[in-house]
Image (cartoon, grey):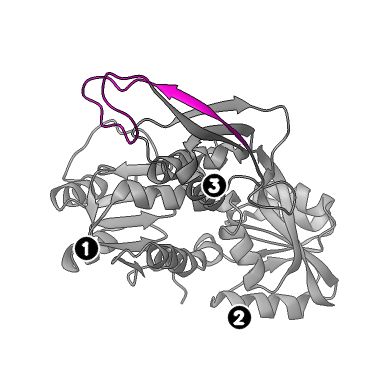
C-alpha cells in the first residue's frame, strides 16, 4: 500500500513547522513531487551517495534528511560531479527527498529537546527565542450531522489550545443557504435549487504553523465539497519557539563527571572541551550542530556548561573567559541521536493512520570525521 508524499509532508510539517526555519535555510521537499506515491522511507542526517545507493538497492523511494540535500542555489547540474551524479540517481529512480533543518532544530520535541533529554536534563527551557507563532481565529460552517466529527478533526490538527487546555471551541447554531450550480456534487440539496439547512458555526484558535494541517483535516472531515470557513489574524501572541535549550541536572556534579556522562550518553569516542574540570555544574545549555554563536546567551542564562558542536579555538577561549565549560560533541554527534527518534515518530503516526509504510533509520550514516 502506497501513501501520497503530500500526506507524509503534512506530518513532517506538524513535527517541524517550516515557519521555524531560519531565513538562510532551505528545508522542505527538495527532490520529487508531492503527488509521488511512497512505499517506504529512510530517515537520515545527511543525504550521501551511500544513502542513495541503499535506497535504490532496497526499493526505498523517500529519503527524509536533516541537512538539506540542496542548500545553495545550483548554477549547473553536471553528472560528472558527486552531487550531480547523486541528483541524477535520485531522479532516475524516482526517489524523493524531504529535509527539515533549522525548523527541526527549533521545533518542540525536535533535535535540541531530544539532546537535552538524552543527557538527562530536567526543567528544560528554550535558550534563544527565534520565532513567535502568530495566532488565527478559524471559523467553519458545518451541517449539524457532521459538527462533532469536524470538532474532533480540528482538535487533532492542533486547534483550540489555550494555556494548558486543548480542544477549546465555541459553537453557534444557524441557517446556511446555498444553490448548487451545474457541475457540482452537493451533499445536501439539488442542482439549480436554492437550499437552506441547519448548520453549526464552530470557532477556534490555531497557530500559523499548523494552519495548513488544519485546513487539510477540515476538508477530510467536512461533508461538503466546498466547505465555507473564515480565517482572522489575531493580536493575541502565540507561543514563542527557541533555538537551543537550557536545563538542570538532577544532581549538581563536577564538570569532569558531567563530561564523562555526556560522552557516554552520546556514544562518541572523543568529547573535546575547554574550561575548569572542577567547577560544579548544575545548569547545562546546549545547541545541537554548530551553536558556538550562542555562547553569550548560554552564559547569560546561568549555565556552567555549554554543549554544542563545531567549536573553534577562539570561540572556546571566549566561553572560558565567560566562566563556561564548553564541550564539543561534534556536529554529527549532537544531531544524529535525533534520527531514530524521528523515524519512530513517523512510524507511530503511520500506524495511527493505518498506513502500511515503513520508516527506517539509515544504516549507512557515519560521521565525516574519524579518529586514530
* Residue interval drawn in magenta: 172-194
Nearer-N-terminus badge (1/2): 1
Looking at the image, can residue 192 be seen?
yes
Q: Toward which corner of the image does residue 171 lie, by quadrant?
A: top right
In the figure, residue 109 lies in which quadrant? Answer: bottom right
Q: Label 2 near label 1: C-beta < 8 Å?
A: no
Q: Residue at x 66, y 66 (%)?
A: 116
- Magenta: main secondary structure: loop
Disc 2: which residue: 264
* N-terminal-most mark, 3 or 1: 1
Horizontal side of 332 relative to 132 (left or right) equals left
The local secondary structure at tag 3 comes to helix
Marks 3 & 1, CB-CB < 8 Å contact: no
Question: Which sits earlier in the primary sequence, circle 2 or circle 3?
Answer: 3
Q: Residue furthest left?
A: 92
Mark linked to residue 151 = 3
Residue picked out by circle 1? 1
Question: How many circles with numbers are drawn on the protein?
Answer: 3
Magenta stretch encompasses residue 129: no
- Structural crowding at the residue carrying mark 3, measured as other residues with C-alpha within 10 Å and reported as few (<14), some (14–19) or many (≥20): many
Q: Position of residue 55 (x, y in %)?
A: 23, 63
Query: At x 30% / y 34%, what residue is drawn?
Result: 74
State which mark lies toward you, 3 or 1: 3
Does residue 189 show up magenta in the picture? yes
Where residue 213 appears, as percent x and y from the top left, is: 47, 43
SS for dot 2: helix
Task: Give the camera-side residue of 366 and 9.
Answer: 9
Within-10-Å neighbours for mark 2: few <14, some 14–19, many 20+: some
**Residue 23 is at least partly visible in this image:** no
Up-down: is 32 above or below 181? Answer: below
Q: For marks 2 and 3, give the CA distance.
A: 46 Å
- Alpha carbons under labels 3 and 1: distance apart: 29 Å
Amino acid at each position: 500500500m502506497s501513501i501520497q508524499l503530500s500526506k507524509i509532508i503534512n506530518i513532517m510539517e506538524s513535527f517541524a513547522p517550516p515557519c521555524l526555519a531560519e531565513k538562510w535555510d532551505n528545508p522542505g521537499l527538495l527532490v520529487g513531487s508531492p503527488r509521488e506515491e511512497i512505499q517506504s522511507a529512510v530517515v537520515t542526517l545527511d543525504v550521501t551517495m551511500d544513502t542513495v545507493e541503499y535506497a535504490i538497492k532496497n526499493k526505498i523511494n523517500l529519503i527524509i534528511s536533516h541537512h538539506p540535500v540542496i542548500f545553495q542555489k545550483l548554477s549547473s547540474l553536471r553528472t560528472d560531479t558527486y552531487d550531480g551524479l547523486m541528483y541524477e540517481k535520485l531522479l532516475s529512480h524516482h526517489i524523493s527527498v524531504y529535509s527539515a533543518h533549522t525548523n527541526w532544530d527549533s521545533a518542540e520535541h525536535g533535535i535540541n529537546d531530544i539532546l537535552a533529554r538524552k543527557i538527562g536534563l530536567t526543567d528544560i527551557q528554550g535558550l534563544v527565542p527565534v520565532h513567535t507563532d502568530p495566532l488565527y481565529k478559524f471559523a467553519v460552517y458545518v451541517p449539524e450531522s457532521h459538527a462533532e466529527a469536524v470538532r474532533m478533526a480540528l482538535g487533532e490538527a492542533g486547534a483550540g489550545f489555550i494555556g494548558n487546555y486543548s480542544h477549546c471551541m465555541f459553537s453557534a447554531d444557524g441557517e446556511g443557504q446555498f444553490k448548487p450550480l451545474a457541475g457540482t456534487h452537493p451533499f445536501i440539496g439539488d442542482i439549480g435549487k436554492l437550499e437552506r439547512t441547519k448548520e453549526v458555526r464552530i470557532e477556534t484558535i490555531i497557530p500559523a504553523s499548523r494552519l495548513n494541517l488544519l485546513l487539510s483535516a477540515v476538508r477530510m472531515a467536512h461533508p461538503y465539497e466546498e466547505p465555507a470557513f473564515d480565517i482572522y489574524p489575531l493580536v493575541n501572541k502565540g507561543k514563542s519557539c527557541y533555538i537551543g535549550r537550557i536545563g538542570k541536572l538532577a544532581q549538581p556534579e563536577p564538570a569532569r563527571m558531567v563530561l564523562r556522562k555526556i560522552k557516554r550518553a552520546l556514544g562518541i569516542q572523543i568529547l573535546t572541551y575547554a574550561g575548569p574540570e572542577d567547577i560544579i555544574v548544575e545548569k547545562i545549555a546546549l545547541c545541537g550542530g554548530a551553536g558556538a554563536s550562542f555562547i553569550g546567551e548560554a552564559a547569560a542564562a546561568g549555565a556552567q556548561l555549554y554543549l554544542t558542536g563545531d567549536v573553534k579555538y577562539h570561540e572556546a577561549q571566549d566561553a572560558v573567559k565567560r566562566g563556561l565549560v564548553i564541550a564539543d560533541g561534534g556536529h554529527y554527534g549532537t544531531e544524529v541521536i535525533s534520527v531514530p527518534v524521528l523515524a519512530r515518530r513517523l512510524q507511530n503516526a503511520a500506524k495511527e493512520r493505518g498506513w502500511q509504510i515503513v520508516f527506517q533509520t539509515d544504516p549507512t550514516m557515519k560521521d565525516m570525521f574519524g579518529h586514530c
